[in-house]
Image: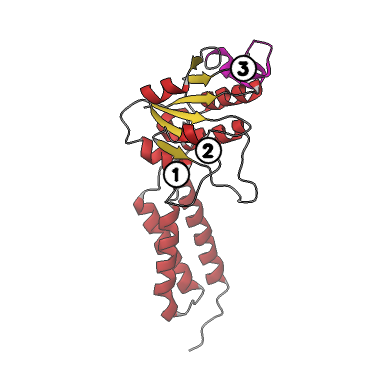
Amino acid sequence: MKPAVAVVEPKTPGNVGTIARAMKNFGMDDLKIVNPPELHRDSEAYGFAGQAREDVLPNYDAVTFDELVSEYHTVGCTATTNEDARKHVRFPFRTPSDLADSLAEVDSDTVLIFGRESNGLTNEELARVDEVCSIPASAEYPSLNLGQAATVTLYELRELTVEETQHPDVERERADEREIEGFYDGFDELLEAIDHPSEKRDKTMRLVRRLVGRAHPTGREISTLRGVVRRAKERARDAEPPRTR
């Protein structure tokens, strides 16, 4: 279920436009604003919104914070957290990637709430939300621009909101296991051709299997690797000195 996105009392129209654009990028369209600024067609909001100026931005709902809390499963997004379990206003919290897994289990309507440019969400507001989300950043400068924070968070939720069919040109399928086994056989023969120490071959092959197993190579990738190994074997055998009896 796609979450709604709410912004509390934004002062900069450009940030609203950036958030609307990020929503469009990652398959979301339900924008809500608490105490919105003036968002006329000539404002930065529409200038920054890209194609979201045609649907997401002009169709935003003006709401109150009370309405968000009463009608949605709420996620308060903040840069400042307390790494202390005794203080439950900003702790515990999830990162955006953790949040994606969490929201996949939520059946009710959800809204992600982003705070003000100057000071974010207040402790009183955070105390009323169901979950807290924070982006891990440098301790020296953890605060992100409002539009940046929303973009990063919505990107991490893309698996909940963007259909895979929107990426037909990306090769995702792992190579056939017979092709991968053929690569292993060829690599083993290469070790023999270069006279790799026999006592090390089993360990080397285990390492190669684990490396390739983690990589999940595509058919094209494994075919290329098999070609390289085949040529390496030919070169190694051509370089062999004649054996004496």
* Residue with the most extreme top position: 41
The quarter holding residue 213 reads bottom left
Report the residue marked by disc 2. 78
Tell me how far mark 3 sits from mark 2, CA to CA.
Answer: 21 Å
Q: Position of residue 232 (x, y in %)?
A: 54, 64
Image disc number at residue 37: 3
Describe the element under mark 2 as helix, strand or loop. loop
Q: Is residue 13 magenta?
A: no
Query: Around disc 1, counting alpha carbons within 10 Å, would you say few (fewer than 14), some (14 to 19), or many (20 or more)?
Result: many
- Determine the residue positioned at 47% across, 56% down: 226
Q: Position of residue 184 (x, y in %)?
A: 41, 62
Looking at the image, which is closer to me, 146 or 46? 146
Q: Amino acid at mark 2?
A: Thr
Q: Where's the N terminus, which quadrant?
A: top left
Between discs 3 and 2, the one toward the N terminus: 3
- Relative to 1, residue 92 above or below: below
Image disc number at residue 124: none
Report the residue marked by disc 1. 93
Tell whether label 2 touches label 1 (CB within 8 Å).
Answer: yes
Q: From this viewpoint, is residue 163 visible?
A: no
Tell me how far mark 1 sits from mark 2, CA to CA.
Answer: 9 Å
Tell me how far mark 3 sits from mark 1, CA to CA.
Answer: 29 Å
Describe the element under mark 3 as helix, strand or loop. loop
Q: Is residue 43 magenta?
A: yes
Tell whether label 2 touches label 3 (CB within 8 Å).
Answer: no
Q: Amino acid at mark 1?
A: Phe
Q: Give the residues drawn in magenta, as a range.
A: 39-55
- Relative to 229, residue 136 above or below: above
- Relative to 138, residue 41 above or below: above
